[in-house]
Image (cartoon, helix red, strand yellow):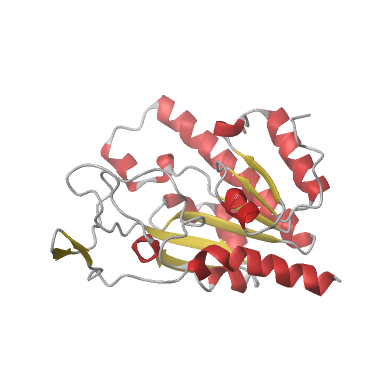
């Protein structure tokens, strides 16, 4: 059993994500759980790691489970290169990851807890049958947000510091979590730099892989604190 597996009574945990929201949760005085990701020693290609992750969610029962699986194989850029047997194998693995994380989300719903899923708006994974079935649930909702509204910007190169749109779709059955994740940019997102204003960038070059849209705290504190407000509501309602 992995270290910290017995840490129970958790309020937020992450899967397919390095520590992001769990780190913020600790700052706000909440009980963070594990961030289960390849970077923290979890490889969900392995059946044993999937089994342990399932057991962790079953035993720890985090109030909010947040997932943001990698989207590389579901990017429209994949259409620009030849489809090979290797790519097919990697795509199949990526589909398996979605199927696994959706099972965890379903478990959260069944037991009266919450999930939040984040993925690029244009990712083809939204059209996967397993994802569409979850979207079709009566209590599951989607919102669309532009990350430039929450401080997202180019992190290196000549355009460093310029706002970056990075349109993202969020899925959850918790309106309290989705509500602050709906700010949109009309393409006139201006920020001052060098004495003049610059327009929002829509390209994806020179973008940092780091903070997830979920964990982003710049320029909009409600965006950062909404998951924790939900936890407060859930805890008080259970007492």
Q: Which quarter of the picture shows residue 176?
A: bottom right
Q: Which quarter of the picture shows residue 152?
A: bottom left
The number of numbered discs placed on residues in the rendered structure image is 0
Q: Quadrant of the N terminus?
A: top right
Q: Measured from the top left, where is residue 193 in percent x and y? A: 18, 60
- In the drawing, does residue 77 fall left or right of residue 118? left
- In the drawing, does residue 46 fall left or right of residue 3? left
Q: Residue furthest right?
A: 239
Q: Measured from the top left, where is residue 190 in percent x and y? A: 23, 68
Question: Residue sitting at 28 percent across and 50 percent down?
Answer: 154
Position of residue 70 relative to residue 226, above or below, is above
- In the drawing, does residue 214 fall left or right of residue 151? right
Q: Quadrant of the C terminus?
A: bottom right
Question: Residue sitting at 30 percent across and 43 percent down?
Answer: 77
Question: Residue sitting at 37 percent across and 46 percent down?
Answer: 75
Which one is nearer the viewer's eye here, 219 or 66? 219
Which one is nearer the viewer's eye here, 137 or 32? 32
Which one is nearer the viewer's eye here, 38 or 224? 224
Question: Residue sitting at 33 percent across and 47 percent down?
Answer: 76
Q: Measured from the top left, where is residue 86 in percent x and y? A: 42, 25
């Amino acid at each position: 059993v992995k270290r910290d597996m017995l840490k129970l009574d958790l309020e937020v945990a992450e899967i397919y994500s390095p520590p992001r929201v769990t780190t913020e949760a600790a700052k706000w005085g909440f009980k963070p759980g594990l961030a289960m990701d390849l970077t923290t020693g979890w490889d969900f290609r392995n059946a044993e790691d999937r089994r342990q992750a399932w057991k962790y969610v079953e035993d720890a029962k985090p109030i909010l489970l947040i997932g943001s699986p990698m989207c590389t194989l579901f990017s429209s850029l994949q259409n620009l290169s030849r489809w090979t047997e290797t790519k097919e194998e990697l795509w199949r693995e990526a589909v398996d990851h979605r199927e696994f994380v959706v099972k965890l989300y379903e478990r959260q719903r069944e037991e009266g807890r919450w999930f939040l899923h984040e993925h690029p708006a244009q990712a083809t994974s939204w059209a996967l049958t397993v994802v569409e079935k979850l979207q079709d649930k009566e209590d599951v909702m989607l919102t669309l947000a532009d990350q430039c509204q929450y401080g997202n910007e180019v992190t290196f190169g000549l355009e460093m510091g310029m706002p970056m749109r990075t349109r993202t779709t969020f899925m959850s059955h918790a309106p309290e979590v989705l509500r602050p994740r709906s700010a949109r940019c009309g393409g006139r997102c201006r920020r001052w730099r060098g004495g003049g204003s610059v327009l929002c960038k829509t390209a994806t070059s020179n973008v940092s892989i780091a903070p997830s849209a979920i964990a982003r705290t710049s320029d909009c504190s409600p965006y950062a604190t909404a998951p924790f407000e939900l936890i407060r509501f859930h805890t008080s309602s259970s007492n």
